[in-house]
Amino acid sequence: MNDTVTLGVLLLILAAVLTLADSAHPFWRRFFNYVPPTLLCYFLPSLLNTAGWVDGENTALYPIVSRVLLPASLVLFTLSVDLRAFQRLGRKSILMFAASAVSIMLGGPLAVWLLAHLAPELVGGQGPDAVWRGLATLAGTWIGGGANQTALKEVFQPSSNLFSAIVTVDVFVSNLWLGALLYGAGQSARIDRWLRADASAVEEVKARVQQEVEATRRIASSTDLIVILAVGFGATAIAHALADTIAPWIGANYPLLSRFSLDAPFFWIVGLATALGIALSFTKARQLERAGASKVATVFLYLMIATIGLKMNILAIADHPGLILVGIIWMAFHVLLMILFSRLIRAPYFFLAVGSQACIGGPATAPIIAAAFHPVLAPVGVLMAILGYAVGTYMGYVCGILMQLASP
């Protein structure tokens, strides 16, 4: 189906899921107690790709949604941001991000070393086809993002066929984990009890922002909605215009800064959109939240979730079972370390989920995970993801060298 039809189908799926989630029927209430609506909004579109009705890799929807709707949603989410409230989240958020990056950096070499003893043919290869070269690019995107992956591809020079297989591993394994995190968001209270974690700081931020919004909320007029869209897309346009100038200029004049992904336009688009949203929170634009700016942003975010789901093919494991096994072992180490560290410092599941996705998914999905807990928390996800961009190339490079040493 073409992209216009696909967009219509996605909106129908979102409408059906969210309508049922709001239903008073006992069955649906019990069902959505265990299955978060966000997870279904992500999983059901993946069936379209798996069935071959949609080409998730080549659809034009994802670039538009990620480059236009995502930054616009970040602007609208941050309009009402309370920086003093976010400061109360404390150092545990940074510690969980650090644990996430380190666990990925070490998990790759561990997976390669383990399989080098059990099934060396899965992690062998020579020259450009050496599996460790492709996995090094996976480390870049799992710690930082696509720009970091591209940088490490140039450094380690894997073959085109190997790199294509690694992209499949990335999409399959990372999206499985994304689905698990979305499910966990609906069970966060139970998980926090098991982790013996104190989620009061997160709850305080949610309650404080939500209370302020509810106290001043009004029914939005058509003018309000136009102004909300103008602010969101206007700030996105400014971010794009600046990114299209800044990123090439840095790449041409300061190539060394590419190690920090500062020559990547998407880095600047997301970063500038967030900065503009925060700046607008100190102006009268903050009052747009009374008319539902965050609700409009939530609509954009649900479209982002559904579009990401289109890229997921649950049958992809049949094409690259060996490499996907490497990715699953790698991810399992990351998940285990995150759980143990979270339990050790008693960090709430919110920090575990956002810290993990800030690395694994970057700015495209970290705000989605944060917003799954509450829309006002979306900025936490993007701020953590920007840290991943900064360290992704360096830590990915170290990971690649360690995987080379661990290879058979």
Image: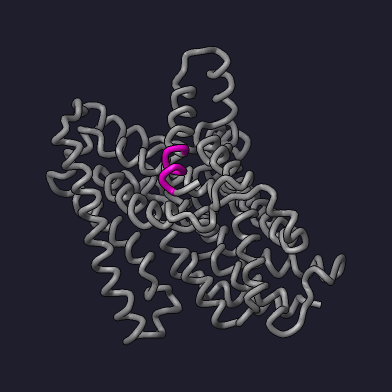
Residue at the far front: name it. Answer: 1
Where residue 171 appears, x then y in whole percent?
60, 56
For the record, the magenta segment spans 3-9
- Residue at (24%, 49%) from the top-left corner? 232
Location of the C terminus (image quadrant): bottom right
- Residue at (20%, 42%) from the top-left corner? 228
Q: Nearer the viewer, residue 161 or 87?
A: 161
Where residue 263 appears, x then y in whole percent?
37, 75
Count up the numbered dots: 0
- Residue at (42%, 36%) from the top-left corner? 11
Classified by dominant secondary structure, the portion drawn in magenta counts as helix
- Residue at (51%, 58%) from the top-left corner? 58
Q: Nearer the viewer, residue 64 or 192?
A: 64
Answer with the quarter of the image where residue 266 lies: bottom left
Seen in the picture, residue 183 relative to 111 is either above or below; the reply is above
In the picture, measured across the screen, residue 100 lies left or right of residue 371, that is: right
Scheme of image coloration: one colour
Residue at the far right: name it. Answer: 118
In the picture, measured across the screen, residue 24 lies left or right of residue 47, that is: left
In the picture, measured across the screen, residue 358 lies left or right of residue 271, that is: right
